[in-house]
Amino acid sequence: MVKVSGPAFSMEASGTIGGVLVFSKWKGRPYIRSHVIPSNPKSGGQTGMRAMFSFLAKAWTTLSAGEQATWEDRAAQLIASEFNAFMSYNQFRWRNFTAPSKDEPAGTADTPATLGALSLSLGVRSITVTQAVTTAADGWGILIFRSPTGTFDTAYDNLIAVGTVSGTDDVVYVDSPLDPGDYYYDTREFTADGQMSAETGEETETVV
């Protein structure tokens, strides 16, 4: 990364030129870097991180003013917004297979939700994953994992979606499009203070 004072004869240059150089800013400082295309943008790791990123970005808008305010100190350290502090720290937690937290710092006092059965329903090139919720308690989200082989260990890089716990409503996710083959699913619940439950138990379905 190269820092510049007036990229492209402008103090606010941004974007890509010729698919080679990228002009942007970081913490208010303009810079230029090489344009890089991921070798496999659909790898397990990237899919798992994007799924969590999507959940967190939506979840931020539902946090209370008090919860958002807990991120002020970390934001000040990063010279960033509270939203960016919330996103970056929780993505870091997830990369280390630790559930995200609404507050900074995360606690251990919340009561996990009680989950019911995990069920699968076969569709046309799709599988609908339904996780029943018996009691919501302090449950925040449901992690949905998928593997092509059975008896797998859940990890950040086989996460495919994150659902929000809303009372005792079922958490439903439609996994599509899928190629023919066997698919194995498992789920885990996590609380608002970053505790993660044990695995619910695998279920499998075959797309033909």
Image: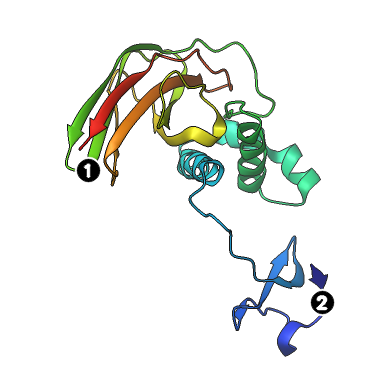
Q: How far apart are labels 2 and 1 at the CA level?
A: 49 Å
Q: Residue at x 36, y 26 (%)?
A: 184
Q: Which amino acid does label 2 sit on?
A: Val
Q: In which quarter of the image is the N terminus?
A: bottom right
Q: Is mark 1 on a helix, strand or loop?
A: loop
Q: Quadrant of the C terminus?
A: top left
Find the residue positioned furthest to the bottom: 9
Q: Is mark 2 on a helix, strand or loop?
A: loop
> Could you classify mark 2 by the number of other residues whose Cα lies within 10 Å: few (under 14), some (14-19), or many (20 or more)?
some
Is residue 75 left or right of 58 when viewed as pictured?
A: right
Residue 16, image x, y percentages: 61, 77
> Where is mark 2, residue-wise?
4
Find the residue positioned furthest to the left: 124
Q: Which residue is drawn at 49% across and 33% down?
A: 158
> Could you classify mark 1 by the number of other residues whose Cα lies within 10 Å: few (under 14), some (14-19), or many (20 or more)?
some
Which circle, 2 or 1, is nearer the viewer? Answer: 1
The tag earlier along the polypeptide, 2 or 1, is 2
The foreground one among 100 and 74 is 100
Residue 93, image x, y percentages: 65, 32
Please give the label number shown on residue 60.
Answer: none
Note whether 48 is above or below 114 in the view shown: below
Q: Tell me where residue 119 sits by quadrant.
A: top left
Is residue 202 left or right of 158 when viewed as pictured?
A: left
Note whether 44 is above or below 4 in the view shown: above
Q: Can residue 10 be seen in this view?
A: no
Please give the label number shown on residue 125.
Answer: 1
Q: Which residue is drawn at 38% across and 15% down?
A: 136
Q: What residue type is labelled 1?
A: Arg
